[in-house]
Amino acid sequence: MNTSKKLRITITLLSLAAVLCVLLGKSIIYVPGFTLSYSFIDALFPPADTSFLPSTTIYVWILVIGSLITCVLVWLRHAWAALAGCAASLSSLVYHVIRSIQNGYSVFQIDGIWEFFMLALPLVSAVLCIVLYRDIKQE
């Protein structure tokens, strides 16, 4: 199996894992005396009385859509598609950083393992998209 095919498979698996983090993951907020837990899947289709911020709803939608677009783009055999996959993968990270700064949160504050993977998987996927771009250019 050649390198570009291995990269495509890895990027696809990482992107799908990021989608699974949204579908299976929970946001856990530790407050003195008790803990609040919310499923991220509830942020995709929040009810009217939701406790999720609108920015969280937008973030999980961008993560899901960007990850699925990345899965499709990396299988196109053009160099521009690898760069577009990188941009799609990074879109959720860029949104997260901008909204964290606007809301006065620390960009690097990670409250749980699910949040870590929701940030790390798209980042690793984007880096591998750049490696795929270089591999396609060399072929």
Image (cartoon, rainbow, N blue to C red):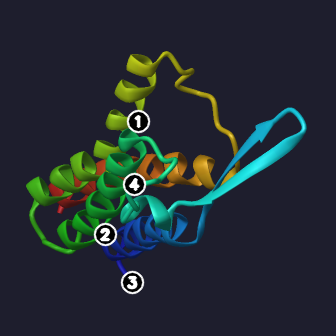
In whole angstroms, how far apart are the C-alphas of marks 4 and 1? Answer: 10 Å
Q: Which residue in the structure is indicated by mark 4?
A: 60
How far apart marks 3 and 1 lie (CA) works out to 36 Å
**Residue named by callout 1:** 96
Q: Secondary structure at mark 2?
A: helix
Q: Residue 116 location, x and y as percent?
A: 61, 47
Crowding near the residue tagged with mark 4, few <14, some 14–19, many ≥20 C-alpha atoms within 10 Å: many
Front residue of 68/81: it is 68
Residue at point 49%, 15% (across, down): 104
Check disc 1 and report its element: helix, strand or loop: helix
**Image side of residue 74 versus residue 90, left or right:** left
Q: Amino acid at mark 1?
A: His
Q: Quadrant of the N terminus?
A: bottom left
Q: Nearer the viewer, mark 2 or mark 1?
A: 1
Which residue is farthest right?
Answer: 33
Question: Of residues 22 and 76, which is closer to you in this image?
Answer: 22
Q: Secondary structure at mark 4?
A: helix
Q: Where is 108 relative to 67, above or below? A: above
Rendered location of residue 39, percent (x, y): 58, 63
What is the CA distance from the residue labelled 2 to the residue labelled 1?
A: 29 Å
Q: Which residue is mark 2?
A: 4
Query: Which residue is more in the foreground, 14 or 4?
Result: 14
Q: Position of residue 130 (x, y in %)?
A: 30, 48
Residue placed under numbered mark 3 in the picture: 1
* Residue in the picture at 32% in, 48% down: 58
